[in-house]
Amino acid sequence: MTLPSRLLALLGRMTTLCVVLLGVVAGTGAAAGAPQASARAAAATERPAPGPVVVVGMPGLDAEDLDPARTPHLWSMLEHGASASLIVRSVHLTTCPVDGWLTLGAGGRAAQPDQGDDPRPPCSAIPAVGEGGVLTGWQRYADAAARTRQASRLGSLTTTLRQRGDCVSAIGPAAAVGAADGDGRVGRATAYAPATLPSDLARCPVTLVDPGGLTTRDRDARAAQLAGLDARLGEVLAAAPERVTVIVAGLADDGPAERVRVVLERGPDIVPGTLRSSATRQDGVVLLTDLAPETVALRGGTPPVAWTGEAWTVLPDEGAAEDRRDAMVDTAQAAHRVQPLADPFFKTWAIGQLVLYLGALLLARRRSADDTTRSRLARGVRAVAVVAACVPAATYLAGLVPWWRVGPPLLTLSAVVAAIALVLGSVALVGPWRRHPLGSPAAVAALTVMVIAGDAVTGSHLTLSTLMGEQPTIGGRFYGLGNVAFALLATATLLLCVAVADLGARRGHPRAGALAALAIGLVAVVVDGSPSWGADLGGPAALLPAVAGLVVVALGLRLGWGRVLLVGVVTVLVLVGLAVADYLRPASSRTHLGRFVQTVLDGGAVDVVSRKAQQNLDLLTGSPLATLIPVGLALVVIALLRPRSALGRPLLPAYERVPLLRPGLICIVVMWLIGFVMNDSGTAIPAVGATVLVPLIIAIVLDARRTDQQPAPRP
């Protein structure tokens, strides 16, 4: 066997290993998830016996405030009850006390009226209860809720409880906001008074209590506020009726900076442990919108389907209360420290890739065979490009390292990401596959696919609080594949499919190569679209047609309109099947796929589509870099459709070495465009996909130039 044949055979084994690893990861995730899902389902049915419920709202409370000496009553709640980090994001980036109480009462995100375009508007005053028990300015809040298109109905908590015969009372001014019904009327509202607490807490089965909140980060002033709040909590606990379940929630921020807060739940049937919500699928992380469903469930009721949150499950934990507090502090610190770094990272990364592209463009020009300096520079730039393409995967793997605990966040996280990217890049560059035209880029693509897909099927733990993942304080996704993760997975998958199909063609088995590429593509589609893993509705609509088109071309078939129509029909059927299958599951187990079906049945599909379109438009016009995305896409399309134009000519040597590369790049761009249209915040898909594709294309082109311009061997 000749050396090239051995190398091609080795690359074939590497590709087979990638497919097997993806299958093993998916199978392991399914096997591991099955018993856990069964255990959690059983635990979810064992709800505490219905009894009185008291919800104490303490805006600004976070895990660092919990201390056995300074806050003994809060610590008792932690020690003898269940706890979790609380994501309080409502409508604006910063959640004001009014926003938190409105969201509790609505069962969905709600907030004070907009005040211009400020994403962090100043907090308005707590409305007073006016004539007839109606909150002043209630209509303004209702109009603001309607404008957000969040489908939140103010007063839904009280309305839902009233329908089953329960009343809701409010103690304290802000609690009245959460206890109001759809018309803004508060049936039972009193001021906070220790002397009357026993009778006030016994008036209704559900009582909302406003003892005040935290409004500063100054240590001394905050300590004084905490002492007062803890003392009032002690009064509430002492005056509460028998068999009461008490929830203490830091349901708003304490200033202009958004942070992760804390929630504590204690009752006669609540064991010490960690709270889990199917809305996040993350142990120890729940949402502000879960408060209303949990309150209704504690009364033995069923939360309305329209509510976006879910009732909690308690995961028993026999460990020390200090360990649970430290885990919540860790979650909050990671989220708080990574968020300010995400935007500078993307901007710096975009500029860095532009510099890399311009440098590669200069080096890709023809040169004489004895120009060793330029040749070395080209090899160096190629190596840098391969390592740069590993950075997105490295940002996810950085979540395995507790970087937020050590040193300056920017310096520490940058060092961790750089070190991981160097390791991944070295694997891609020095492996035996490196001599194949797509060897190193294919290795980077395979590593990226395994990181993103592996995280999705094992619980999406790496995606939280990472530079290119989901930011908890933003309150977007907490599991599955968001737009950023999808863009990385889909782009890397298609490039890997090109390499596999090209390998099959080089070895004289184009059909086998095409089928192997199809297998890889279908595994990625299943991981992305499965409600248990990726839970992505728009992703399969973009990835499946691109995979199908690439496979058709790899088989040597003509991609006519008939086949395009067939691919479109199959894609629609797959999407409908995934969504309907998710919809048929219990309401508490549905992802946003099943909830979208419910939205369509309820007639709210137009609002969802218009909201997605508005979000894309806002992102496109929100920054100068974002406005360059359509321009960049247009230039890429021209380069691909006109390969001999000034834009497309630098890629010709790569096309000659890998004939399937140009169709593959066209399929990637098609996937980007469909993903852009199908997803809210879809603007990010081409931008993020380019962070992997551009460096790898640079590496491919430079390698093709180097190979073409090597001197012919002497006879």
Image (cartoon, grey):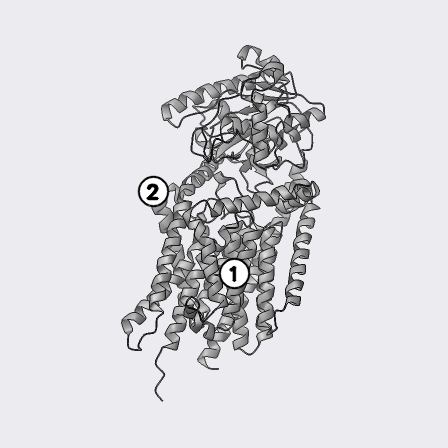
> Mark 2 is on which residue type?
Pro
Quadrant of the drawing holding the C terminus: bottom left
Q: Is residue 407 left or right of residue 330?
A: left
Residue 533 in percent (x, y) is at: 59, 51
Q: Which residue is mark 1?
A: 669
> Which sits in the foreground, 545 or 536?
545
Q: Which residue is mark 2?
A: 408
x 65%, y 19%: residue: 204
Point out the frontmost of discs 1 and 2: 1
User: Is residue 679 depicted above or below 437 in this figure?
Assistant: above
Residue 389 in percent (x, y) is at: 42, 59
> Mark 1 is on which residue type?
Val
User: Is residue 649 depicted above or below 482 in this figure?
Assistant: below
x 52%, y 66%: residue: 664
User: Is residue 209 depicted above or below 145 in this figure?
Assistant: above
Q: CA distance from mark 1 to mark 2?
A: 38 Å
x 66%, y 42%: residue: 599
Q: Classify mark 1: helix, strand or loop.
A: helix
